[in-house]
Image (cartoon, rainbow, N blue to C red):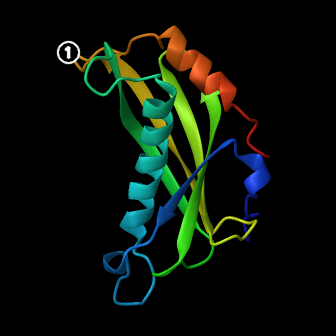
Amino acid sequence: MTKRRPTRSEYRFFLEIPTRWMDNDVYRHVNNVVYYSWFDTVVARFLFGTGAIDLTDSPVIGVVVETLCRYHAPIAFPDRVTAGLRVERVGTTSIRFGIAIFREDEETASAEGHFVHVYVDRATQSRPTPLPDALRAAAAAVQAEAPG
């Protein structure tokens, strides 16, 4: 079964990321673990850039409880990639971020996936806590329906 490749128009926030020589593996394409680093980077840049989460002072922090990545087409150094981000679901204590990786200026994703963050109290890091208003507002600004 072939999965439909998402397009740029389905995402709301974008971050350009250069590939590095060390990202390539012995098969001469970017290794799978690098995609998760790109996912983490676009989510962090969105959260910190909007002020929804402060790296040192926020009373809540997001912990990743689920990840997924589907690979559609290879990427290799020296390609330039753009990570697209959208919020697919907002719960009481969690957010599901949808992410796609686009090679060069291509309109369809080379990879796609998601991160689910559950927000917990910074001090205890054990109890889920309701999303702060600033985080909820930032998420609403990039919320989009995931295509069926």
Residue 86 as seen in the image, left or right of residue 74: right
Residue under circle 1?
Answer: 124
The residue sitting at 76% across, 36% down in the picture is 145
> Residue 74: x and y, percent?
56, 79
* In the foreground, 20 or 116: 20
- Crowd around label 1: few <14 · some 14–19 · many ≥20 (10 Å): few
The residue sitting at 73% across, 64% down in the picture is 5
The residue sitting at 51% across, 37% down in the picture is 46
125 to 38, vertically: above or below: above
The residue sitting at 49% across, 47% down in the picture is 42
> Residue 99: x and y, percent?
58, 49
Instruction: Name the quadrant of the N terminus.
Output: bottom right
* In the foreground, 115 or 77: 77
> Residue 147: x and y, percent?
78, 46
Q: Which amino acid does label 1 sit on?
A: Thr
> Residue 53: x and y, percent?
41, 23
